[in-house]
Amino acid sequence: MKIAITGMGIISAIGNTVAENFAALKSGKAGISNLENISNSVHKGVLKVGEIKLSDSALAAMLKLPETHNFSRTSLLGAYAAKKAVENANISDINAYATGLVSATSVGGMDKTEQYFYQYFEDPSVRKFITSHDAGDVSHKIADALGLKGMVTTISTACSSAANAIMMGARLIASGQLDRVIVGGTDALSKFTINGFNTLMILSDTYNTPFDENRKGLNLGEAAAYLVLESDKVIKETNKEVLAYLSGYGNANDAYHQTASSANGEGAFLAMKKALQMANISSFTIDYINVHGTATPNNDLSEGHALQRVFGTAVPHFSSTKPYTGHTLAAAAAIEAVYSILALQHNLVFPNLNFKNKMEELYIQPTTVLLEKELNTVLSNSFGFGGNCSALIFSKP
Amino acid sequence: MDNLKLELKTKIIETLNLEDLSVEEIADNDPLFGDGLGLDSIDALELIVLMDKDYGIKLTDPKEGKSIFQSIQTMATYIEQNRTK
Amino acid sequence: MKNCFINGLSAISTQDTFESDFVNSLKTVNPNENILRATEPNYKAFIPPAAIRRMAKGIKMGVATSAKALEEAGLTQVEAIITGTGMGCSQDSEKFLKNILDNHEQFLTPTSFIQSTHNTVAAQIALRLACKGYNFTYVNGAVSFESALLDACMQITAADIASVLVGGIDEYAAHTFSLYELVGFIKDKKNVPFSVLNPTTKGTVFSEGATFFALENTKNASTYAEVVDIQLRNKLTSAELPTFIASFLEKNNLETSAIDVLIVGNNGDVEFDGFYKEAMHGFKDSIHLYYKHLSGEYNTASAFGLWVAANILRQQEIPEILRINAIEKKGYRNIVLYNQYRGLDHSLVLLKSVN
């Protein structure tokens, strides 16, 4: 099974377009800065995050929304990136084929809920945001922004969400249910997630350093990215250029702990194995891995062991792009899918920024320079709370 | 010290929702984690907040908790020596 | 190509559905309540005390019903766990958010945050079963459960997996429900008594519940029904509904007359129940049933509807309390379920008897 990818759109801390993201990745320009947009947070001006420096009203203006709109920030980011993906795929009539949207989010409209939680009871003018809270509302808003009428659903499996949305989209096409699916994820920064990760004591007080011996934790980020998946029938009929193929995927559960990953990375190992099996390739075929690499002590150790188990002594070049963007939760696998495709298109391995010292427990270390090499097959990992582990394999057309 | 230990037992039962347990059933030297009370890493994070909120003790590295949270006895001793409120 | 069979099920709802049998469990609810709460069993038989101490109601309901559905199917393990929830773990989300706001981001503890993620129920079930297989959670309003069901059936029919636990869970949460009252999604108490079939006001009676199904690719003595097809649509006008239904039947090579029973999701909202009237209009010769007068409305209440349908097909018996019309049939082979919420998230599910 190979599913064609014909469009992509992205907005992240390192750019509002695919081109801007690519330029930043190439030049090693990170997007981590002090928190600014959440004005009434104690973490403002102190905490390092991958923030998109655009206000909600600036984003709404970019989407040409009326003043009366009730889009949460998550919806604004999602609608923007999804529209760009559809444009990129040269789709003029979104409903010309049986089309669906499978979107991912973890916080949904939490940014508005936390802003108006008590105010809702006194101030009728803000009540329009009450219905923007749930995850499904985000997807409905995106579908409306695209003019899409069809199957719309949302996946929320914490930090692996978007990988699972991509998987479900592929499955819907492979099974013949749909001809075209817009897939991806979106998450805005919120007090809820910032404080949540803070209570777990896994936020770094400085820049995140994946796979480094002295890593201190993650930086949160916000982003949205979407891909357009299309069936062979559509590709044939429209004679469309294929950017890359999704050629394998795997999902498994670590079944170890509600938040922590197992020491030997069992879930990650199983997800990668399944993806390789589905793509019908050996581990030697993988040219580059965009790792999950959040820079928490637990994730990188667990993922590192899983990589060594899958690839043995022949672990391919790998890097985490989270030093650029922060960990963008439910959007992470979607933006990293875009980065994996960019890597394939340009035959480039993006550097794992901020790395200094190899981890003592592992014999592998990430690629720290921009490396030019022929890439035909790229693996992208994403893992989340609840033991959720996902792996995607992208290949050249 | 005895009052502090009793206070800690009550707080632990309440904070960690150990409904089936009574203060009398927790001995001062019972291990809190593993085979004793069976607490886990999430409970450890809850205890770190309890130390900060009620006794003004800030632990920045979860690893520090390991020796402090061995038992009610070790917790009480650490609190006596380091409390700021 | 394999078929997808329901071999075990379990529901916790406002009704006594967990302990009691199908026909005897369904009773009229108090028409003067605008919020109904689920009848909870003693969870200790299903969840160890060390695990239960942190669980909010939704997690407990989900873990208990999944365990019972699995047991009924005679399974001890599955290859996948797929859940749907419209609002997720609302109680823990509210608790953590309140702590953030009330304590100005100080002295926060992780437990409620950890349990607030939408996939907590699926994750807890995986932990309990040590199930390392596929694990997904869908969160899309009234099609949250149907999305999970579609995913499960696609994987079973494609022979990717042989067994799967699929469930829908939504829990009551005080703040969320009071916001729903504020925007009129929940009926105003001054308009009691409420009627689902002959409503006079907007909004609906809200509730909570968990319903789980054990699906397998083989039929056995405990099989309830076969799930044949599922179709989802984000939005429709009332005028577009007949075409949506017709193309679904056509895809499955069925005439309207082959549908013995149509189960509709009426929730007593004058603004949106017109969709169901339109649907029933298209199935003039079928038996029409409803269930939300018994379960209340919540994003995954349609899973309770599927529980009703599966029970009818296995027992070949329709409790009177479910009936809208008086049409009689000799037996029940094909059931179509139609649901939507506030004009969004339309779903059709086709169920077939295995007798």
Image: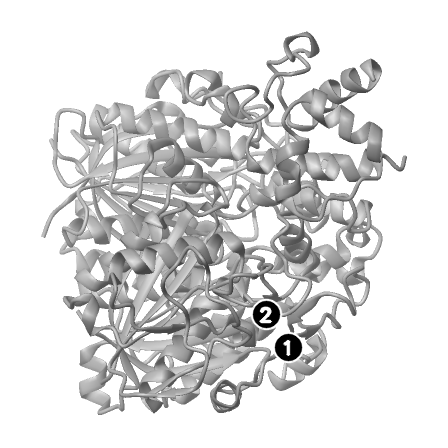
Question: Looking at the image, which residue is at 65% across and 13% down?
Answer: B26
Callout 1 environment at 10 Å: few (<14), some (14 to 19), or many (20+)? many
Which chain is mark 2 on?
Answer: A
The answer to which image quadrant residue A62 occupies is bottom right
**A96 over C188 or under it: above or below:** below
Q: Nearer the viewer, residue C288 or A334?
A: A334
Q: Which colour scheme is used?
A: one colour
Figure quadrant of the C terminus of chain C: top left
Q: Is mark 2 on a helix, strand or loop?
A: loop
Instruction: Say left or right for A178 vs A351.
Output: left
In the rendered image, residue C210, in percent from the top left (x then y), is placed at: 45, 34
Which chain is mark 1 on?
Answer: A
Q: Is mark 1 on a helix, strand or loop?
A: loop
Q: Which residue lies furthest to the right in this view?
A: B85
The answer to which image quadrant residue A272 occupies is bottom left
Question: Looking at the image, which residue is at 62% across and 40% down?
Answer: C112
Q: State yes or no: discs 1 and 2 in contact (Cβ < 8 Å).
A: yes
- What is the number of callouts on the image? 2
Instruction: Say left or right for A300 vs A93.
Output: right
Residue type, numbered disc 2:
Glu
Q: Residue furthest top?
A: B24
Residue type, numbered disc 1:
Ile
The circle drawn on residue C142 is none
Question: Looking at the image, which residue is at 39% across and 59% down?
Answer: A362
Q: Which of C263 and C307 is in front in this view?
A: C307
Mark-to-mark CA distance, 1 and 2: 7 Å
Q: Which of A342 and C88 is in front in this view?
A: A342
Q: Which of A323 and A132 is in front in this view?
A: A323
In the rendered image, residue A358, in percent from the top left (x then y), is placed at: 46, 66
The circle drawn on residue A222 is 2
List the residue tagged with mark 1.
A52
